[in-house]
Image (cartoon, rainbow, N blue to C red):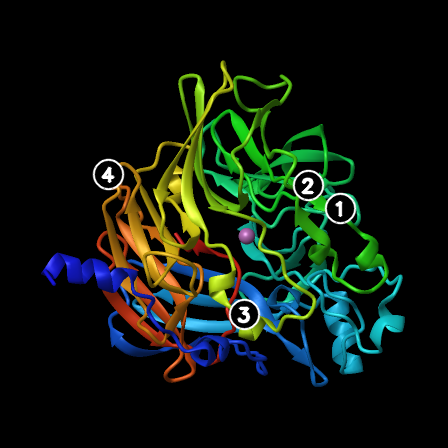
Amino acid sequence: MSKSALKAFKEKAPRKFDQQDWSSAYCNVEKELENVPLDLIKGEVPQELFGTLYRNGPGLLERGGQWIHHPFDGDGMISSMRFANGKVNFSNRFIRTQAWEEEQKAGRFLYRGVFGTNKSGGLIANIFDLRLKNIANTNVVKLGNKLLALWEAANPHALDPNSLETFGLSSLNGALAPKEALSAHPRFDPGHNNEPCMVTYSVKTGPKSSIRLMEFATENNNAGNIISDRKDTFNGFAFLHDFAITPNWAIFLQNSISFNPIPFILGQKGAAQCLSSQKNTQGKFLLIPRNSGVYAGENPKIFDAPSGFVFHHLNAWEDKNEVILESIYYNDFPSIGPKQDFRNIDFKALPEGQLKRCKINLSSGEIKTTTLSEQCCEFAMVNPNFLGLKARYSWMATAQKSEGNGPLQSIKKLDLITGNNYSWSAGERGFINEPLFVPKEYSNTEDDGWVLVVIWNGETRSSELVVLNAIDLEEKAVLKLPINHPYGLHGSWASSK
Ligand code: CO
């Protein structure tokens, strides 16, 4: 076999990973630490990195001997990794949600989880109990002088950015009604229309769904105050986990999904398990004009979307009369069965995510779709200073092999124009979380910066923080974390400068 044929063969051959190496990351975090200096395993932490990496995700997976049904039902825990002078300090703290406090006292689950965790006591205890548990576990961002722990079906929790102490539920200075949903995926506009701001939304869903699009100041004394607010109503059920922004538009993909609440009401399934893809209807792109843009006050534009299901978008930008949206598409909605154990999931049986680009012609309604990367990926991002503009580079988590589904074990830097890429692997026994690109301060070079990622080392059964050079993914530093960190969801970087 020639060298190139051998390489192609090796890439196609399914690489083995040990299911136990992967699933052993799912463990309860038993301690809360404050400002613990991290030990270097190798390399050096770049002196220029000044700021804090915040991560959110499930930190509690079992209570009173009962395991949660799905990791998304795990109580939110915030970790902070503070970089200064080539050193990193670690803190972690559970968010003191009302449910966490009550269940901590009781020593057992008192609430049902949205992803199928039932409280103890069987069907009788769960039937007709429709209270949702705000577990604050999906994302964490800094807005003004507060951290917000986000969970998309309720108000956020506000926290102290240094001590990670929970202040309580936040209405964002009165902008949100009590119990109003707030997306876990705000987008930070770097200043397309004058001042930088945080753009986010609230969805009310039903046979008709409404999207409330909100923008919040992020600068100076005004930080945290709402500066723009509009509401639009659309036909059909809307499951909108994420969105994208350009200078003039907020762009949503309304997946073709239906919701049958009966098994939830009867205590047989969690609310999110009652979602299923609807084969006979088409997904829609919903483009809502931003109040700060040139189409302010106009009606939304609606276009048919290609088939497939999207959780996360990478980026969007405008080019004359086109809006271009890059997203991670799944062939189908990856539903979570009521009888499955998440630690034994069969990756091969689930659809993989692929990065695609859709060009939406605003005049003709024509949609052109191209696949940017076939390799299974998730958690993709561009340089935050290029959000909403045509960005050349993207960083994302990928499976180890080039085809099919698998656990996330590598990071890829993809040139979105040429398709050239670099990759870094955590190894056959390593597994990764969402990688974050941190731009180098005062640099105008798009890919100048670092990639920060928390990984699970299946060999040593411990967590590590890895720092890569964003340009070529060269490993700069590996540090040992003082806790075993379950796989998390999303996080963010807050610069100290
Ligand atoms: Co998400």
Mark 1–mark 3 distance (CA, rounded to whole Å): 34 Å
Q: Which residue is situated farthest in the left direction here?
A: 2
Q: Secondary structure at mark 1?
A: loop
Q: Residue at x 72, y 39 (%)?
A: 237
Q: Secondary structure at mark 2?
A: strand
Q: Position of residue 359 (x, y in %)?
A: 43, 27
Q: Which amino acid does the dot numbered 4 rest on?
A: Thr
Q: Which residue is the site of mark 1?
A: 180
Q: Which amino acid does the dot numbered 3 rest on?
A: Ile
Q: Is mark 1 within 8 Å of ligand 1?
A: no
CB-based contact (under 8 Å), mark 4 and mark 1: no
Q: Which comes before the other along the chain, label 4 or label 2?
A: 2
Left or right: residue 117 versus residue 384 is: right
Quadrant that contains the N terminus: bottom left
Mark sitting on residue 202: 2
Q: Position of residue 470 (x, y in %)?
A: 28, 54
CB-based contact (under 8 Å), mark 4 and mark 2: no
Mark 4 or mark 2, whichever is nearer to me: 4
Q: Quadrant of residue 288?
A: top right
Q: Is residue 474 visible?
A: no
Q: Position of residue 168 (x, y in %)?
A: 71, 60
Q: Which comes before the other along the chain, label 4 or label 3?
A: 3
